[in-house]
Amino acid sequence: MTHLALWISQAQFFLSLSFMLLFPLLEIGLAWALVVFRLRSLGGSDRWRQAYRFWVRVFALAFIVAFAAAVPVMIQFGSLWPLLMERVGNVAGPMLAGAVLSVFVFKSCFVGLMLFGQRHMKERTHAAVVVAVAFGVTIAAAWPVMMFSWMRTPAGAYFSNGQYIVTDWSAVFLNPSFPWYFGLLVLTALATAGLFMMGVSALQGLWRPSGDAEKSVFAFAVRKSVLALLTLCVFALCAARALAVHEPARAAAALGYWESSTVPSLTILSVPALRGSGELWSWRWQGRGASFLASDVRGVYRGLDQFSGMAPPRDATFWSLRVAMLGTLLMLALASYAWWRMRMAGGDASALPRWLQKSLVAAAFGGWLVAFCGFAHIYLGAHPYAVAGTVTLSEVLTGTSVPALMAGGSALLLVYVLSMAGFLQLLWHNMRYGVVPVARHRGRA
Amino acid sequence: MIDTLAMALGMPPQAPEFWLPLTFMGLLYLVVLAGTVLDGFDIGVGCLSTFAPAHLKPRMLALLSPWRDANEFWLFIGIGLFMAAFPLAWGRVMAELYMPVTLLAVGTCFRSVGYELRLRAPRELQGFWGRVFGLGALLTAFSHGLLLAQLAMLSQNETAHVWFSLFTAACSVAAYCLLGASWLIMREGGELRARAIFWGRRCVRWAAAGAVGVSVVLALGNPGIFLKWSSNGGRAAVVGLWCLMLFCFICIEMRLQRMINTSLRSTALPFVLTLLVFTTTFMGLAYSFFPYLVLDELTLWDAAAAIDSLERVLLLVGLALPVALVFNARVYWRMFGMSLPPEPPEFSR
């Protein structure tokens, strides 16, 4: 009964968190792309002005959904894990306040000006506002990442009497995993937005010959995707090496290192047995992967068997990482090939072969897929802990009954499906018929 | 008064352990009050838009446009402040209230997504997103009522009180509708105004019934509150608040009755009176609950985070407060009076 409630709560929270993740990723990536478009259009270039005009609407849509999705997550933080705030409140409080207040400041001051105030400002002032928005959305995302990473590597505080007490705030804010998770977030955001813009331009190229603005955006998006994905691959490898010490269980699950021994090994693929904990078939690389595993003082590499009872769900953690990595490599290959073909076609998406155009359209959501699976790996890798090593999820679990949890979860799922459908429908409409300007006047209607 | 309070807790009034939680409680009260008062007409107009005839809906929703950006924030800030300042009460309160707060989350999402997407959607989908916005507003109003009912009898066996919760939720929808209708009366002329008067007349008695119901249950269900109300200073305050509320309801009722026949000029009176009712109800609740966050169990000093965390939160609040004040003053400046049409932009060539 409790077990079921735990998994339903876990699924519900994961659903809300990952939905909240998707739109800020797009929003952050697009915000930085818009900086480029806006700065380039300062010289009076018409193509970049048009590019800005189109993509700022998509940014606005992503921003709306991202903001709406943040409220359920905050509420569920209390309603699903009621005792969690009691345990970590002293640490999480300032970070939460930072997140809420920076979203407030940047949304009320800068996003409003960027979207509705362009006409009332000088060109250069507006460009400065666009830059400020890009910094703002990135800073606002840094706070929740800080909190999330602190819960994985709780530094700068000690646990006593069921409560974390802070000893060193700078160690809390710059906990060991924060730079890595934040870097992963920003790079994934850039890649997501790049792939998204690439796919949208390719679809426009399928429908009609590309205009100047669409060509520029396509060339920009292809380069941005390739560079971001390459950097992401390198950065993710570095992050995996650095985080192995701090998150040994997740590292063991990621490498498929089931049993501890003195010889490291790296499982590339593994099919679990239907019964028991063995495996039907696996493809191993003996002696490799030492730097991605944690080891104890005797030089024994820590396998998943050392965490009996407190290990993350094995196959889900293992396979979500595989899908994310495979997706990243596939997207990288596709984007690189598109770059090569694009140079021959002069940056024109409509001159590419049809199969490539169609694959690029399909790849528009590749960034989201990679982000979703990667996040699933990181999130499930911490199970069953809410705060690594001290607070388990089952001890902070809500006492709400399973049917109520199911009903609440389904209602939220409906909200997410509707928001996603609305976002995609409007995007499609904008691509097909052009953007519709929206005005907002202070105090007048 | 502050000195007596500090004395009762055995802390000097200058100690941060004493005044920091108190400051945050004040801020939280302020945000919740601002949320109900400033966001209230938005919820109300949203609720009414589900019942309004099709040709009036676009105008009703368009009237809300200047305030949407600011209105969305009150709940967000309120939750953030509560979590950051009183982490020990947050879980206790939220765990009891799983269903209402989930409804609130759903309603809030529907409202923000529905409104903004409706603005940008092609014509044939605008009706759909308008309905999503209306449904979101109904859910929000309903969940506010459920929250109120549950708060009023948190210490008791819940299963016996489903009917009271539903009744309060229905009354809460009526109260928000009244607020929305009286705002529309002030804001717009013509058919919309005439209809708003009728909507308001239908709602006002239900809103009054809800207010009475909540106060009765609050007093009879919680001995601590009853004691507080019947104490020497408390009696005058409670009777004063009740009389004020009764007076407001009667005035609204009479004003709306006569408005049909006598006057078609714009009037802010029903709106101001309804705001007064909301404020009074809130002040009554705040007075009854203070200093508890979980009634008779957890005071705001018990529930507060450690002092150095609170100091950091306060620093952040201090940084954001000037922005918040200027932004809100600027946005809500023209909330009263008839709606002015927007000026056409100046095109520079």
Image (spheres, coloured by chain):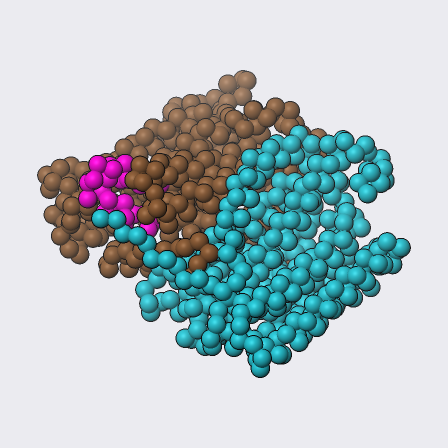
Left or right, residue A356 beside residue A3 = left
Q: For the magenta stretch, what is the residue range?
A: A31-60
Q: Nearer the viewer, residue A309 or A173?
A: A173
Q: Is residue A196 above or below residue A148?
A: below
Tell me what residue is drawn at x 44 percent, y 73 percent. Answer: B56
What is the x, y in percent for residue B253?
A: 66, 75
Tell me what residue is drawn at x 57 percent, y 56 percent. Answer: B38
Quarter occupied by residue A400: bottom right
Q: Nearer the viewer, residue A179 or B319?
A: B319
What is the x, y in percent for residue A307?
A: 56, 33
Q: How many marks?
A: 0
What is the x, y in percent for residue B274?
A: 64, 65
Q: Is residue A76 in sight in this rendering?
A: no
Q: Nearer the viewer, residue B40 or A65?
A: B40
Q: Is residue A213 above or below residue A171?
A: below
Left or right, residue B168 beside residue A14 = right
Left or right, residue A18 beside residue A365 = right
Q: From the image, which quarter does the C terminus of chain A lie in?
A: bottom left
Q: Is residue B113 magenta?
A: no
Q: Is residue B276 in sight in this rendering?
A: yes
Quarter occupied by residue B288: bottom right
Q: Is residue A68 above or below residue A300?
A: below
Quarter occupied by residue B305: top right
Q: From the image, which quarter does the N terminus of chain A lie in?
A: bottom right
Tell me what residue is drawn at x 69 percent, y 40 percent. Answer: B23
Q: Is residue A42 magenta?
A: yes
Q: Any idea which chain is the brown one in this picture?
A: A
Tell me what residue is drawn at x 41 percent, y 57 percent. Answer: B116
Q: Any idea which chain is the cyan one in this picture?
A: B
| Magenta-drawn stretch, dominant element (helix, strand or loop) | helix
Left or right, residue B112 beside residue B74 = left
What is the x, y in percent for residue B206?
A: 66, 73
